[in-house]
Amino acid sequence: MRSVGRPDAEVSVLLTGDRAMRSLNRRYCGKDKTTDVLSFALQEGMFPDIQPTVLGDIVISVPAASRRAMEAGHPLSCEIERLLVHGLLHLLGYDHERGSHEALRMQRKERQLLKGLSR
């Protein structure tokens, strides 16, 4: 959290399965399929200042993360770290779906943060 300039901030993390992730993705994103990570920001919406130190929730599907890790040829723990960083960046306002410039910006920040974790 210190690496992103929010040393006192908090996030909650839920590790779940594909069925629960699909349900969340359908309910909150309108996509009837599982995904690897979802972020729910508390700093957005009608009352963003109620808990300024709580950024939100990150939900990770462990089976989806496991499949991605196998495809990429790295351990599940590395994939979970990548998804945590990805989810955290979404909570901080990064969004790769806004276009190629934003996607590149987010990828650079992900690499920077992951590199910091490996030290």
Image (cartoon, helix red, strand yellow):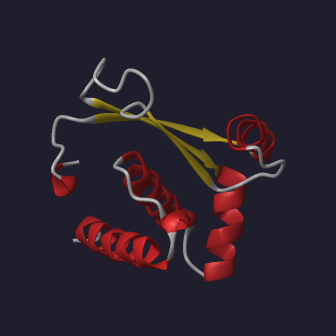
Quarter the C terminus occupies:
bottom left
Relative to residue 76, is residue 90 depicted above or below?
above
* Front residue (pair 48, 92): 48
Q: List x then y, in percent, for residue 76.
A: 57, 64
Relative to residue 93, is residue 45 depicted above or below?
above
* Quarter location, residue 21: top right
* Quarter location, residue 75: bottom right
79 vs 67, left or right, is left
59 vs 52, left or right, is right
Q: Residue at x 78, y 44 (%)?
A: 22
Q: List x then y, in percent, for residue 13.
A: 48, 38
* Quarter location, residue 14: top right
Q: Residue at x 29, y 71 (%)?
A: 118
8 vs 43, left or right, is left
Relative to residue 77, is residue 7 depicted above or below?
above
Q: Residue at x 61, y 82 (%)?
A: 73
Q: List x then y, in percent, for residue 24.
A: 71, 37
Q: List x then y, in percent, for residue 84.
A: 45, 54
Q: Residue at x 55, y 77 (%)?
A: 74
